[in-house]
Amino acid sequence: MTWPPPPPRSQRLQLPEARRITDTAYLASATGLLFIALYYLPIGGPFLRLALPLPLALLQLRHGGRSGLMGAAVATLLLSVLMGPVRGPLVLFPYGVLGVWLGWCWNRGTGWGMSWSVGALVGSLGFVVRLAVLSLLLGSNLWVVITNAAARMLGWLLTVLEPVLGLSLAPTIPQVQVMAAVLILLQNIVYTLTLHMVSYWIFPRLGNPVSEPPEPLRPLVALDPL
């Protein structure tokens, strides 16, 4: 005895589900390609860093949290195969996590204050994770190496400027480390704000608008180059 085949309708994906799967595959692949280009190409680094979180943010904005997490997982698995199990997951820190976070906020209409501030912290923590992984791979504490080199360079610069300034300054290693941490945080504040502005300009053209900016930033956001 053979069972009759199911009706053709039950074998077909509904259009929203098919679109969700397709968007997840394409946007996760775009994230992987951008990360490979950032890692291996000697040019275009700032533009690639700016574009990296956007595919996952757009995926999260279109289809919700589950699709955003699936896209991040697919991009991580793809890069783990292509670049190895250590370098591949670095796409999450901070680009993957930041893209999922921004998409989550914009999907729920959260204000820029929350998405911007937490996004800057996510970016700073992502830098720490990447630095720790690279230190593990190289067998040397890169944070100590960088801050020691910065302290020597700053000390030399202040020695040169001492006759002009009339001050004798000698920065210590802890002071240089605090300054470096503050600079990293400021850099990620600017980076996250730039991501907000670029997304505000681009995503509405794709049919997925993001949250409105606060009033003090409206004159800056109004400078739409597109």
Image (spheres, rainbow, N blue to C red):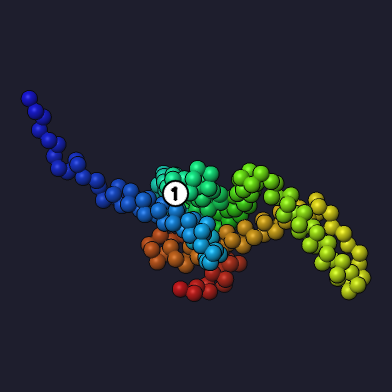
Q: Position of residue 110 (x, y in %)?
A: 52, 53
Q: Position of residue 194 (x, y in %)?
A: 56, 64
Q: Position of residue 24 (x, y in %)?
A: 37, 50
Residue 212 in view here:
no
In this rendering, position of residue 130 left or right of residue 180: left
- 222 and 71: which is toward the camera: 71
Residue identified by numbered label 1: 82
In this rendering, position of residue 174 left or right of residue 98: right
- 214 and 23: which is toward the camera: 23
Which quadrant holds the N terminus?
top left
Depicted 31 relative to depicted 165: above or below: above
- 162 and 41: which is toward the camera: 41
Residue 7 in view here:
yes
Q: Residues within 10 Å of mark 1 (few under 14, many from 20)?
A: few
Quarter location, residue 58: bottom left
Depicted 88 relative to depicted 150: above or below: above
Q: Amino acid at mark 1?
A: Leu
Check disc 1 and report its element: helix, strand or loop: helix
Quarter location, residue 176: bottom right
